[in-house]
Amino acid sequence: MSLEDKYLITVGLEVHCELRTATKLFCGCANVFGSPPNTNICPVCLGLPGALPVLNRRAVEYAIAIGLALNCDVRRSVFARKNYFYPDMPKDFQISQYDEPICVEGYLELPVAGKRVGIVRAHIEEDTGKTTHVGSSGRIQGADFSLVDYNRSGIPLVEIVSAPDMESAEEAREYVSELRAILVATGATDGKMEEGSLRVDANVSVHRKGTEELGTRCEIKNLNSLRSLGRAIQYEARRQMEIVEEGGRVRQQTRHWNEDQGVTSSLRSKEEANDYRYFPEPDLVPLEPSSEMVELVRAELPVLPPARRAALSDLAGGKPNRSELEQIGTCIGLDLDGFVSSAAEAGLPFKLALSRAANELAALVGAGEALSPEAFVGVLKAEDSGRLSATQAKAVMAWLAETGGAVEEAISALGFVGLSDDEVGSLVDRVTAEHPNEWGRYMAGENQLAGFFIGAAMKASGGKVNGRVFSALLAGKRESAQS
Ligand SMILES: [Zn+2]
């Protein structure tokens, strides 16, 4: 029996989401990524003595939008000081929300796993600066010196804390991917994990199957891609199982994920809330969004991924299978569901549209190219009618994404113009005349020889013949010869 069969994994996630406001949370400095270090700073976000915070209204609206999208209660909240000393935080405290967060008690559905994950809370806080340790390790141990960039200091964040409802690395990945799609749809964030707009910490514990009590958890930091998240959880769960199996005890720790080595390592013993000596922020009044404000934000929410997924699932005509659910997820994550519904509305088969959107179109979009929904539908029509083979249809999509223009233009530029029915008819006459022996056998009922003739016709036409049309005309020739 493997360890994985003996133990259950429990995962809870904390996701920090950078909001797409024009300015920072408490000052007028620009909220942009990639500026030269220490250029978007002022006395407030540098924490200079006497500087006072002024709350950014847009950040509050985004936080409310996130709460509503995650089915939370939005309510009165209080800002608090979270005290700790680290050079990237010049005030020596971070303004956050503690015992009265703005959003509580929501949930998110995992479509593929088919389960609901609770959202304990989502609160507003400011980001810290960014420290770069210069030296061979890139970490503080062994660094020659460290540099601090305060451009990120004071950028508005919403931290979303899930319940420990996930039971595998796979479910955790699905949660983050679905959460990301929802957050991006609200407009609150660009969701770019590679730029740190979305940062994930994972709380992982294991316990023996058949026992109730959860094990001691470790928190893994530095997870900046779905791949890292999955690998780190798998590694950490395995590490804990081995400790417990050998009769040891898992120590509560904050651990660092090392992407290159594929291991987690101890960063520090995990803090308890009282280590931070939280107290209410005296420079900010409690935040009490009016119901009018909440309803205004609700009215402006777009159709969110769960509803968009339901719409596509309806088009699937019944319950989509697992791979279709994954394809639907890919389409929604990349905003391609409109392509699939346009194609379905044009009478094209749903499965074909979904597959082309989730695979070929998604790859093109991933490479920074674009295709109009009309062009997509046009290509699929040509493929569905048999005018283009699957390979040709994919090539046409790629050509259109790169060059633009009309579907017909692409088809002729790529030399995929098919033959007219008359031309195919003469091709039938030609190849049957060239192969009298096979033709005789086909006439006598050896139907599999149709493939032989199609091959010959493909060769003779340089691949331009439509196999479906050719087969029909070939069968027609035999019928009229026999009657
Ligand atoms: Zn500032």
Image: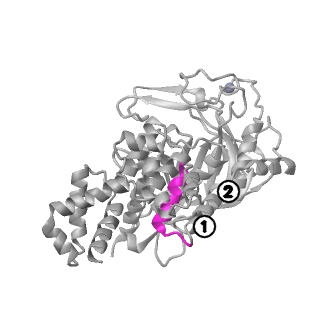
* Placement of 434 over or under 480, stated as above or below: above
Residue 372 versus residue 6 in the image, above or below: above
Tell me the SS state at disc 1: helix
The label shown at residue 314 is 1
Colouring scheme, one of rainbow, by chain, secondary structure, one colour: one colour
Q: Are marks 1 and 2 in contact (CB under 8 Å)?
A: no
Residue occupying image coordinates x 51% and y 46%: 375
C-alpha distance separating marks 1 and 2:
22 Å
Q: Residue at x 16, y 60 (%)?
A: 434
Quick check: 471 left or right of 222?
left
Identify the magenta region: 318-334
| Pointer 1 residue Cβ closer than 8 Å to ligand 1 | no
> Percent position (x, y) of residue 131?
51, 31
Query: Mark 2 belongs to which amino acid?
Result: Leu
Q: Earlier in the sequence, mark 1 or mark 2?
A: 2
Residue 218 visible in image: no
Query: Does the magenta portion include 5?
Result: no
SS type, badge 2: loop
Of residues 122 and 357, the one nearer the viewer is 357
Residue 242 pos. (x, y %): 36, 64
Count of residue discs: 2
The secondary structure that dominates the magenta segment is helix
Label 1 or label 2, whichever lies nearer to me, is: 1
Quarter of the image that includes the N terminus? bottom left
- Residue that numbered label 2 is attached to: 70
Q: Quadrant of residue 260?
A: top left
Q: Going by the image, does 407 lie left or right of 127?
A: left
